[in-house]
Image: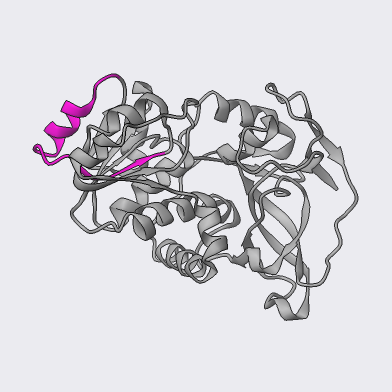
Amino acid sequence: MQALLVESLSPDLSGVHLADLPMPTCGPGQVLVRIKAASLNFPDLLMTKGEYQFKPPVPFISGLEFSGEVLEADPASGFIPGDLVMGGQKTGAFAEYAAVEARSLRKVPQGLDCSTAAALGAAYGTAYTALVELGGIQPGQWVLVHGATGGVGLAAADLAKALGAKVIAASGSASKLEALKASCHPDAVLLAEGRFREQVAEITDGKLCDLVCDPVGGDIFDESTRCVAFGGKLLVVGFAGGRIPEISVNIPLIKGFSVVGVRAGEYARRFPERGRVISAAVDALASSGKLHPHIDRTLPLSRWREAFDAMGGRGIVGKIVLVPGS
């Protein structure tokens, strides 16, 4: 089978290439899936450089998540051949086939095609963990979402709207603001550069934000500490901007807000019963048409470098889906 293999860690993807590998076999507790679509996530790019918190030993097949058709399954898995499933593990999605643990899969929600399902799981699972599980989002609250043109950011803005919040969707790219309005219909958009606290205050009539979802870090985090309302939460999702920021603890003390770290995958692993609740809630919202995963482009797996370069250059709105075997 064809798969995207990371043979060495490198800053320029020189250690990554398409390879012909043996077909995986289905072991106890596993499901063999023919992959129909796999979505690109920022951690996929970081793992090729050894810059993600999870560092798989090389060589490994890249890719966090996919959707596809079950070919073979352990009888105790709950799946049968022909089922359409979504999910995955930390690696292995960018391939024609994958043998994965049954517990890492769930059926594609009714009404979704495989490309949309592949774009749903990780981004919306992270957004739900941040906003609902850890943020305690309530209808009518003001939510500021940074990196809102990226996979997790756009999912967070979309989910917050679906849950009745008032959303400020922020991007560091002025050229993407119109696309952002069309993709998630926020209450306001914000060009996140320099000192943007006064703009947030004007949008919210001085109330500031109950929740700030930050997958960017760096200067965005620093300025966001000025945008959180008393009693609010600043949700740290990642550091796509590169710099890991620091904060003097007198700031959240004086302003009365919490800084909350969000590791959605680890949260689901440590609290599997909550992980199942999160997945079921996301799937139900998606099936009801309340969520709108946005796919920027769909590319054959052979054009993987184009996809990685677009993500690294912040040249997308939403998700890129890779299709194996094309």
Give the percent coordinates (x, y) of residue 190. 27, 30
Q: Is residue 263 left or right of residue 24?
A: left
Q: Is residue 80 left or right of residue 113?
A: right
**Residue at horizontal 74%, vertical 35%?**
302
Q: Is residue 213 left or right of residue 3?
A: left
What are the residue bounds of the magenta stretch? 194-214
Give the percent coordinates (x, y) of residue 72. 79, 70
Instruction: Judge whether residue 239 can be spotted in this image.
Output: yes
Q: Nearer the viewer, residue 169 or 216?
A: 216
Q: Look at the image and say whether residue 202 sits in the magenta stretch.
A: yes
Give the percent coordinates (x, y) of residue 4. 77, 39
In the image, residue 90 sits, relative to residue 298, either above or below, namely below
Give the percent coordinates (x, y) of residue 138. 24, 59
**Residue at horizontal 63%, vertical 30%?**
308
Q: Nearer the viewer, residue 309 or 292?
A: 309
Q: Nearer the viewer, residue 230 or 40?
A: 230
